[in-house]
Image (cartoon, rainbow, N blue to C red):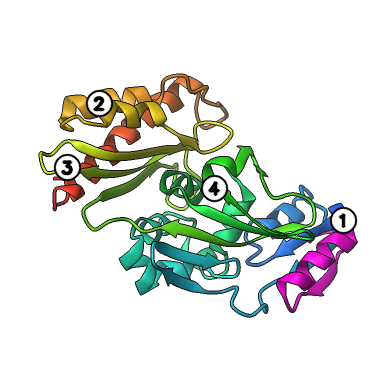
Amino acid sequence: MKPPKFEYVRASSVGDAVAALDEHGDGARILAGGQSLIPMMNLRLARPTHLIDITRIPDLDRVEEQADGVVVGAAARHSEVEGSEVARRVCPLLPEALKLVAHETIRHRGTVCGNLAHGDPHSELPAVAVALDALFTIAGSSGQRQVPATEFYFGPFMTAVGPSEMVTAVKFPAIPKSAGYAIAEFARTHGNFAVAGAVSIIELDAGGAVRRAAVSLFGLASQPLRASQAEQFLLGKIPTPEVIEKAAAAALEGVECSEDMHGSAAYRANIGRVYAARVISTAVARANGGEPK
C-alpha cells in the first residue's frame, strides 16, 4: 500500500522544525528514520498532512559522551549507536538492547529517539530508558524542557511530548564498571516485538549484597513498567537463586497484564516473571565479574 498524500518539509534547525510543527498543527509529524511512521501511514493508521524531515539538522545525529552518561541525538540511527565505542563503554546495556530491535536493515534507518518517542509498550528501548532513569530533552515553541523516562510514558503510544514539540535528545546515564546489566525477551520470532521482556541493572556491595537494583518490564502492559517492588525486595540481600525468584515474583505483583492473540494475561505474567528472574540472574553474574552459566 501507498501512504496518503502529504507535504514534505525539510527542517534546517530545531527551531525550524518546531515552527513547522506549530504552523501545521495536529497534521504534522516528525520524520527521522520513519521505520514506525511510514508503515502506519501505509496501513492508514496515521494520516499526517505534513512530514517534517529533521535528518539534515546539524548535530542531531550525535552520540556524545558526557561526564555521567551518553547523549543520543534525535537523528542518530540504531546502527550508529549499536556500533558506537562511546555507547559500548559508557552504557553497554544500550547497544546490547539494540541488537534485539527489529532487524539489521531496519536498524540502519530507524532512530533511537524515534523508537523511544513512538512509545510502543512492546519495544525494548523504552524499558531500557526507564530502568536507567534516562532523561529526555524536548523542544517546543516555549523552549526546551527535560523529562525523566519514568514520567515520559502514559500508555500505548502516549508520551509527554506535547503539541508543537519534539524530542531532540535522550541522555542515558553511565553504568558503573562494577555493575551488572541484562536485557532479555520472549518474541515469536527474532526481530518481532516482545510478548514479554525485562531489563535489570544490579550493583553489589563488598559483602555481595545488593546495593542498587533497577528492574523494568516491557510487553506486559500499556507502557514500560518500573518494578519497584522487586527492586526494594532485592536491596540489602545476598542475591541467591531463591531471593531472585522471589524478587521476580514481586516484580509482577499488582501488574495488570494485557492480552491479545499472542497470549493471555496469565501467560504474559508467567513469562514476565521468568524473564525478570533471568535478567536479574545475568546482571548479578556480571556484577560478580562473570557471565551466567
Q: Position of residue 13 (x, y in %)?
A: 72, 76
Q: Which mark is residue 205?
A: 3
Which residue is farthest left?
Answer: 207
Q: Which mark is residue 148?
A: 4
Q: Nearer the viewer, residue 151 or 122?
A: 151
For badge 4, the amino acid type reads Pro
| Residue at numbered disc 1 | 25
Q: Position of residue 293 (x, y in %)?
A: 13, 45
164 sits left or right of 201 in the view? right
Asked if the residue at tag 1 contacts the one at tag 4, i.e. Cβ–Cβ closer than 8 Å, the answer is no
In terms of secondary structure, where does tag 2 sit? helix
Q: Nearer the viewer, mark 2 or mark 4?
A: 4
Between the C-alphas of marks 2 and 4, the distance is 29 Å
* Mark earlier in primary sequence (2, 4): 4
Instruction: Answer few, some or many: residues within 10 Å of disc 1's Cα (few below 14, many 20 plus, some between 14 and 19).
Output: some
Can you say whether 200 is above or below 176 in the image? above
Is residue 234 one of those drawn in magenta? no
Between the C-alphas of marks 3 and 4, the distance is 27 Å
* Mark earlier in primary sequence (4, 1): 1
Residue pictured at 86% horizontal, 64% vertical: 6
182 sits left or right of 104 in the view? left
Residue 196 can be seen in this image:
no
Q: Nearer the viewer, residue 253 or 274?
A: 253
- Give the quarter of the image for residue 284: top left
- Give the quarter of the image for residue 155: top right
For badge 2, the amino acid type reads Glu
For badge 1, the amino acid type reads Gly
Q: Nearer the viewer, residue 166 or 107?
A: 166
| Residue at numbered disc 2 | 245
The residue segment tinted magenta is 4-25
Residue pictured at 21% horizontal, 31% vertical: 236
